[in-house]
Each structure stands twice: as C-alpha cells, then as structure tokens.
Image (spheres, rainbow, N blue to C red):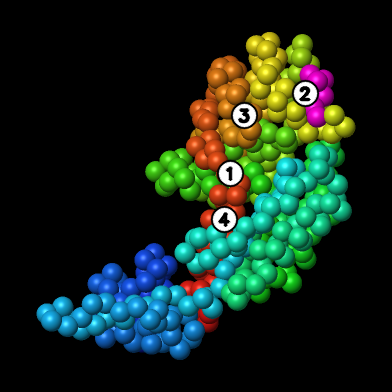
Amino acid sequence: MEPAKPSLALVREATDDHVLRALMRHRRLTRAELATEIGISKPTAGESVRRLAERGLVADTGERTPGGRGRGRVGTYYSLSPSVGTAVAVTIAAEGVVAERVDVFGDAVTRAERHLDRPARPAQVSAAVGAAVSAVCAGGGQPVRFAVVAAADPVDRVSGRLVQLPDSPFLVGDLDPVAVLSPHVSGPVVVDNDVNWAARAERDHRGPDHPRDFAYLFLGDGLGCAVVSDGEVRRGHAGLTGEIAHVLTVGPGGRAVRFIDLFGELGLRRAGSTAVDTERVRAADAALRATLSTAIAGVIDAVVALADPERVVVGGTWGPAVLDGVRAAVARTPRPVAVDAATVTTAPVLTGVRAAALDGLRAAVTAPDA
C-alpha cells in the first residue's frame, strides 16, 4: 500500500513555517530569495507570503531590488511584521533584577535593571521585579507573547511560585513571578531556578556532540546543582531536584556536616546571611581551599550516586577558583567522574533565559493558529 500523501493544508502549513523561519534567519528576503533558500518554486513562495501577510505575520518592507536593464524584474523585500510580537527574559538574583525584551530576531529591544540591597527582602524584590518588567514592556507597540523568568531560589514546578527553603540566602518569600508578569504578557510565563537555566545555556553552547548527561554545580553566593539527563534538565516532582545545600558531606576533621553549614564553620558567610562570601573564598589559603575541595567532592559523590552523570560541570562566581582541588579530591572518591569548568562564563543564567524566551516567541509565531 502506498503511503498516504499529506493534505494540501498540511503542505501549506509546512511551507509557511519554512518561510517564517527563513525570515527569522535573514530578516528580509524577496520571494525569489525565499524560493531559493527553502527549495520551493517562486509561485509557491509567493502564495505563502500572501497567506502570511493576510494573517499579519509578514509585511512589505517598502524596499526594492535594483531592476531593469538586464537585471530582471524589481523584487520586493519582505520581513516579519512588528505585530508578531516580542518576548521578555527576566533574572532575579541577590545582586538585582534584570529584564530584557527581545524581538523575533534575538535582538534586545529594551533592557531594565533594578538594584537590590544585601540582604534583599521580599517586598523589595517584588517591587524591583514589577518595576523592571513594566519598564521593558512599556511602549514599543509590539505585544509581549512569551516570558521566561530565572530566580535564585527553588521554583515550584506547578505554580511557578518561588519556594523558601531553610537557610536560603536569598529571602524572596512567596514571590509569584507569573502573577507579576501576566498583566504584561499575552502568552505563557515560564519560571525556573537560575542554575537550571545556566545548565541549559551550557548544554546548548557545548552542542549535540558533547555529553547529554551531566550535572552543573553552581558555586556562588548560593549553592545549587542542575541535573541534565538525555539533554533535558530534570526538575523532580516539586521542582526541587539539585538542591544540594543540605547534603551531608565531609567537614573539618572528617566530620559529617551539611554543605551549607560548612561555610558558617569556616567563616565564609556574608554578615547576617547564609550567603557565601565569594571574596573570602577567592582569598582563601591552601589549607582552607583543601577543606572546601574535599567537601565539594563529597557533594559530587552524592550527585554521582543518585544521578549517574557522565561528567560534572562547575560554574558560579568562585567555582573555577577551586577547580583543581576539586578534581584531585573527586579522583579519590569511590566513583570518580570527569570535572570540567563551565564554558559559558558571561551571564550564563541570562543567556539561558534569553534563548528560551526567543525559542518560545518563535514557536508562538510559527504556530498554525498564530
């Protein structure tokens, strides 16, 4: 039996999808250029442009190709219409709130930052998020169709609310980013922990040829871990996978100690907070670094026992500073694993959030009912 042929409607949907994505890559193209880029006939490209223009997704830019005198017909350049909208990327961290509005080409249209005191308090954090989002969403005439939020706290997988765990260094209370952003966004608002977004950025930067099973250990003001299995970040039943602060590890003198408590015992906390004092860690002497490395290796040993990653990636503001000691300590554990430095070192969280916001926006634009 011959396989069923796709319907005309399905063929048109696929063609329209290809046209939209070609315009996302090249910003503007003529119908002839679209035909060449996609591998379709010029009439087919023209019909697709007509359909997409009727849906308000494609517009004539007003620009024309040189024509006449042997140069062929004058061609019209088409681009995506401004009405396809934008997306918002937001990061909420101890040092402040950053919000960006990105267009379908991946360009930042507007950006806003709001400083937070240390230690930040729930009311200030909530106000800063609202102010930053309002600033980037104001004006512009383009709808905001998708939003992605990263928070330096655990995130409830179902509701998107931030979860306050014991000894958390970043006090945001019961902040609900979905409720804060929803008045500004016509589509979904996706919220996840900042370390998970950094891990996604690391995965994408390394590409498909690199291991798809790894753990991303974040060592900064806070302590976190993301587990990536088969290329996907695993969040767990409540979204709390990778919360390593309370893992028992090896402390001074070989005693068992909770990972978060170790920094208090070693005098490496910020005053009045459980946040790690990154400056003191970087300035630590050899003996103190050896103690830290042994403790971190104990945490990695627990992660390996439960998640079985092929390798561990170490990021964060002070993680690379202790990398050599951690590698040596991990080599002495029952199940040694390769330990690498993170490759995305400039704004890894925002990089992951921005990429997800762009992907979500493009998916919304290319949806058949867009």
Horizontal arrangement in the rendering, residue 58 relative to residue 242 (left or right)? left
Q: Earlier in the sequence, mark 3 or mark 2?
A: 2
Regarding mark 4 in the picture, which secondary structure is present there? helix
Q: Which residue is mark 2?
A: 268
Q: Which residue is mark 4?
A: 354
- For the point 77% across and 23% down, which residue is it? 268
Horizontal arrangement in the rendering, residue 69 relative to residue 269 (left or right)? left
Magenta part of the chain: 264-270
Q: Amino acid at mark 4?
A: Arg
Q: Is residue 86 visible?
A: yes
Instruction: Tell which tag, 3 or 1, sits nearer the viewer.
Output: 1
Q: Is residue 95 magenta?
A: no
Q: Which residue is mark 1?
A: 347
Mark 3 burial class by Cα count in 10 Å: few <14, some 14-19, many 20+: many
Q: Is residue 267 magenta?
A: yes
| Labels in figure, total | 4
Instruction: Tell which tag, 2 or 1, sits nearer the viewer.
Output: 1
Query: How far is mark 3 from mark 2, CA to CA?
Result: 14 Å
